[in-house]
Amino acid sequence: MDNVIKIGLGIMIKDGNKVLLGHRCETYGDTGGIYEPGSWTFPGGKQEYNETIIEGATREVKEETNLDVSNLTIFNAEDDIQPNKHYITIQLIANKFDGELKNLEPNKHSEWKWFDLNHLPENLYSPTKKFIDKYLEK
């Protein structure tokens, strides 16, 4: 790593008390982010140069799930640090979405699935787990 802090985006898409999680493929390579194959994660990714946080979050959700999110709100920001990687993850919440859910990156996610916040899978992506834990504290 070049000792640069990067910006990650994690988007909690809510449908009542359910949230959308994608299962990261075991065989998908390291993209330079926090690398945890086989975990369940919110849609998200890296913010690109010259795009706003909201634009980046909207783009990442569309690229991964085919869903169009609107009325995004910034919930929190967290440090996500692993050896040789440091991300500030901006956590956003989308209570409104439109479109048909599709897995648009099947090499990256094996599936997308809705989970009740009270019955989540055990193997959560560490930034997603931090996000959910903070959200449930409120």
Image (cartoon, helix red, strand yellow):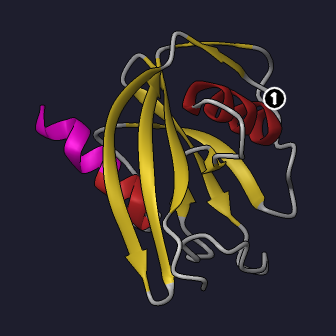
Tell me, yes or no, whether the highlighted magenta stretch contains residue 132.
yes
Instruction: Choose top left, top right, bottom left or bottom right for residue 57.
Output: top right
Q: Main secondary structure of the magenta part?
A: helix
Q: Position of residue 13 (x, y in %)?
A: 52, 28
Q: Residue 9, position in %: x, y?
A: 54, 45
| Identity of the residue drawn at 19% across and 38% down | 136
Instruction: Give the residue pinned by disc 1.
Output: 66
Is 24 inside the magenta-drawn segment?
Answer: no
Q: Give the quarter of the image for residue 81.
A: bottom left
Q: Element type at marker 1?
A: loop
Residues packed near mark 1 inside 10 Å, few (<14), some (14 to 19) or many (20 plus): some
The C terminus, quarter of image = top left
Q: Is residue 113 above or below residue 38?
A: above
Looking at this view, is 8 or 28 the one in front?
8
Residue in the image at 38% along x and 49% along y: 120
Which percent across, then down, holds residue 105?
A: 85, 51
**Range drawn in magenta:** 131-138
Residue at point 47%, 15% (across, down): 95
Q: Nearer the viewer, residue 55 or 102?
A: 55
Q: Count up the numbered dots.
A: 1
Q: Is residue 125 left or right of residue 69?
A: left
Residue 108: name its quadrant: bottom right
Determine if residue 29 is in view. yes
Q: Is residue 126 above or below residue 129?
A: below
Question: Residue reaching furthest left?
Answer: 137
Query: Residue 92 placed where, x, y %?
Result: 44, 32
